[in-house]
Image (cartoon, rainbow, N blue to C red):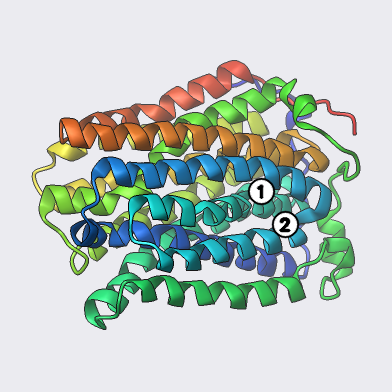
Amino acid sequence: MTTETPAARLPLLPKPRGRVRWTICALLFAAVVLSYIDRLVLGVLKPQLQDLYGWTNTGYGDITGYFQIFYGLGFLAFGWLIDRYGARIGYLVAMGSWTIGHFAQILVTSTTGFVFARIPLALGEAGTYPAALAAASQWFPKQERAFAIGIFNAGANVGAIVTPLLVSALVATLLLDWRWAFVITGLFNIVWLVVWWRWYRKPAEHPAITEEERAYIEAEPAVDSGRAGFGQVLRHRQTWAYMSGRFLIDPVWWTFLFWLPDFFSREYGYDLKSFGPPLVAIYILADIGAIAGGWYSSHLLKRGRSPNRARKTAMFACALFAVPVMFAVQASNVWIAVALIGMACAAHQGFSTNLFAMPGDLFPRFAQGTLIGLGGFAGAVGGFIASKSLGVLLDTIGSYEPFFVACGMAYAIALLVVHLINPRYREADIAG
């Protein structure tokens, strides 16, 4: 499956005193949690708003589909922005934009209105992973990077766990108007922005870092200066491997995020008060997958495996765990369906954690934001196609089964495509 050479092995660096890099990781984790809360509030409210305002599945598919298109465009913009101005400015602009869009949703009730209100939300949230991955590349050497990515990537699942519980408490238990779900969750963003602006710096500039921790982070040679445009990055097969992987797996995750409440409502009669526990269980499993996937490849690196073998072995294991989700629609009860979907979500997060490590592994830092932007755009295009197709599918044949069959196959196909395009996992030769 993989080709390994002694030169590809990484030097093992001794752990230093100092934990500033893990505080940075905690901030990145919190940002991902908030981004997922903000994008998922609408999905949790979908059954209620559908009843209140007569939405169709095709109309809801428009909301989620166009969100992903603008999300993809935002990825291109933030990839460029972060390469030039860094993660600190990038995250400030990103969360500021998505907070405006999040609050704007209280002003509309139609599916068309939500499409337009969520444009700044989509554009801003696109900066989440380019900024986080740029910060991880800056603060973590390769032997820790996938594990750190796995930790903040797990924030997606924490956000997915918290959202149905929080929205249910606000709307179904406290009987607040649905708009308060957007107002209260949006206020958390303002707190994070203040902390981020005051705390985040590059390792060389951070006042709290020890000399030992700084030396540990900077032990790996890195090219930090230079410029790489989209055309220059697109000339490399490593770019197309990363983009292809994102195009094939991102639609699965996006569809789970936006449509699972509807799946449990349609298949099992669950509502705002009852579909919280199944969603919590699914995203707890996804959290485990995110951390385990990152830990496993980092563990293989520490044992002397090449990045090629370590990343792809972890992705192969994740692809196997995704296969049983093909039978989720045929499950005899809700908890069997939860187990199958939860395994697939865990597989996705473990797989994506290792896919997200590719920019930091293979590209100089000045080109990583551009690559991440291109990958995010590719994933958003795939998500748009999947979401629009699923909305039409449900309004015509009324079944989720074709979607779940595609989910079970997506990760094995993605790994095969990534391996065929970049079999040796070689670093891209980009001159700044």
Q: Is mark 2 on a helix, strand or loop?
A: helix
Q: Residue at x 63, y 43 (%)?
A: 75
Q: How crowded is mark 1: few (under 14 residues within 10 Å), some or many (20 or more)?
A: many
Residue 90: which numbered mark, if any?
2
Q: Nearer the viewer, residue 129 or 151?
A: 129
Q: Which of 411 and 100 is in front in this view?
A: 100
| Residue 280 rendering spot, x and y as whole percentages | 31, 62
* Residues tagged 2 and 1 counted as in contact (Cβ below 8 A): yes
- Image quadrant where residue 389 sits: top left
| Residue 383 rendering spot, x and y as whole percentages | 44, 37
- Could you give the CA–CA distance between mark 2 and mark 1, rounded to whole angstroms? 9 Å
Amino acid at pointer 2: Gly
Taking 2 as reference, is 154 above or below it?
Answer: below
Q: Which residue is drawn at 63% across and 68% down?
A: 27
Q: What element carries label 1?
A: helix
Taking 159 as reference, is 423 above or below it?
Answer: above
Q: Name the residue under label 1.
A: 130
